[in-house]
Image (cartoon, rainbow, N blue to C red):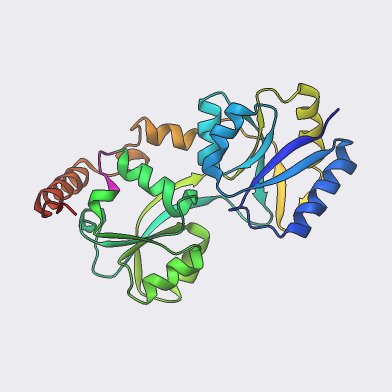
């Protein structure tokens, strides 16, 4: 049996020696040979799995949802950070911003384009009410980590940030701020198996990896509905009873976004 290719996006912050130890441990536990490969971006996973359906990948939950929806790969295991609970995505603003309706024309700080809690989930949340984040905010900046985005808010470089619930203490220790909305819990990363990965390989990987602990990471069975949050947001199914926006706030956001879009001067030809 040839080695199973195991894709690891660069956003998975594990040193190379730790990754090598992980794959050696997988081989000891399962008897399977794996061939690890680093990816520059998790966004490449759908096209890679479409071309190579016999690979396994460590996927952010938002990408795992796409892979599952397109039937390119199925969740095999969830990735759990040991000793921590579930995370929610939080929009946190400096004082003076009273609510979501005050976000028009503000400066937003994101973590990275591949952060579920620090970018993707809050944008999906706003988009599920017809609000276009690219028109809502005056500027958008990426800071690369939850720590860096919290420090940017403290320095006054941005007015609002997206982060996760476990980073809130760090935020509030550095600046007076208020929580605008909490969305979640956000699903953790997933180990996904392409549709052509043999059933016996899936079973051996799932069983063997559940016995591993890599630094602070453990691997657990996928719970029912693990990725449902992304489906709910994409179907516009979030409502006020679930912690969503009231009709009045939603209308205020959409109206102010449209006014901002109309007030922008036309682009000049270069």
Q: Work out whether 142 lies above or below 236.
A: below
* Any part of residue 226 in sight: no
Q: Where is residue 49 in the image (x, y as percent from the top left)?
A: 60, 31
Q: Which quadrant: the N terminus? A: top right
Q: Which residue is drawn at 72% across and 49% down?
A: 218
Dominant secondary structure, magenta: loop
**Is 134 or 82 nearer to us in this picture?**
134
Q: Work out whether 158 lies above or below 25.
A: below
- The verdict on residue 72 being magenta is no
Q: Which quadrant: the C terminus? A: bottom left
Question: For this view, does 19 lie left or right of residue 254?
Answer: right
Q: Residue at x 45, y 55 (%)?
A: 118
Q: Position of residue 12 (x, y in %)?
A: 62, 53
Q: How many marks?
A: 0
**Is 228 or 234 nearer to us in this picture?**
234
Q: Where is residue 154 in the image (x, y as percent from the top left)?
A: 38, 75
Q: Which residue is drawn at 50% across and 45% down?
A: 186
Question: For this view, does 175 lie left or right of residue 30?
Answer: left
**Is 116 or 3 nearer to us in this picture?**
3
Question: For this view, does 76 lie left or right of residue 252?
Answer: right
Q: Position of residue 210 (x, y in %)?
A: 77, 41
- For residue 52, what is the image quadrant? top right
Question: For this view, does 261 lie left or right of residue 29?
Answer: left
- For residue 48, what is the image quadrant? top right
Read off the magenta span.
129-133
* Any part of residue 192 in sight: yes
């Amino acid at each position: 049996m040839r080695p199973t290719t195991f894709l690891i996006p660069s956003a998975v912050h594990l040193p190379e020696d730790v990754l090598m130890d992980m794959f050696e441990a997988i081989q000891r536990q399962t008897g399977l040979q794996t061939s690890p490969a680093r990816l520059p971006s998790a966004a490449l996973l759908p096209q890679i799995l479409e071309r190579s359906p016999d690979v396994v990948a460590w996927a952010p939950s938002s990408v795992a949802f796409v892979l599952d929806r397109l039937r390119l790969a199925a969740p095999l295991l969830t990735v759990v950070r040991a000793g921590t609970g579930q995370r929610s995505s939080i929009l946190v603003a400096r004082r003076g911003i009273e609510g979501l309706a005050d976000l028009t024309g503000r400066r937003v700080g994101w973590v990275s384009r591949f952060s579920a809690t620090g970018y993707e989930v809050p944008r999906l949340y706003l988009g599920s009410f017809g609000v276009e984040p690219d028109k809502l905010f005056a500027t958008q900046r990426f800071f690369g980590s939850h720590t860096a985005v919290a420090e940017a808010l403290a320095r006054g470089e941005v007015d609002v940030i997206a982060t996760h619930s476990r980073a809130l203490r760090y935020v509030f220790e550095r600046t007076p701020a208020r929580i605008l909305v909490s969305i979640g819990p956000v699903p953790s990363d997933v180990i996904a198996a392409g549709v052509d990965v043999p059933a016996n390989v899936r079973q051996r990987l799932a069983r063997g990896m559940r016995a591993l602990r890599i630094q602070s990471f453990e691997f657990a069975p996928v719970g029912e509905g693990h990725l449902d949050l992304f489906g709910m947001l994409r179907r516009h199914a979030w409502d006020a009873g679930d912690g969503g926006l009231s009709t009045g706030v939603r209308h205020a956001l959409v109206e102010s976004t449209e006014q901002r879009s109309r007030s922008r001067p036309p682009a000049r030809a270069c």
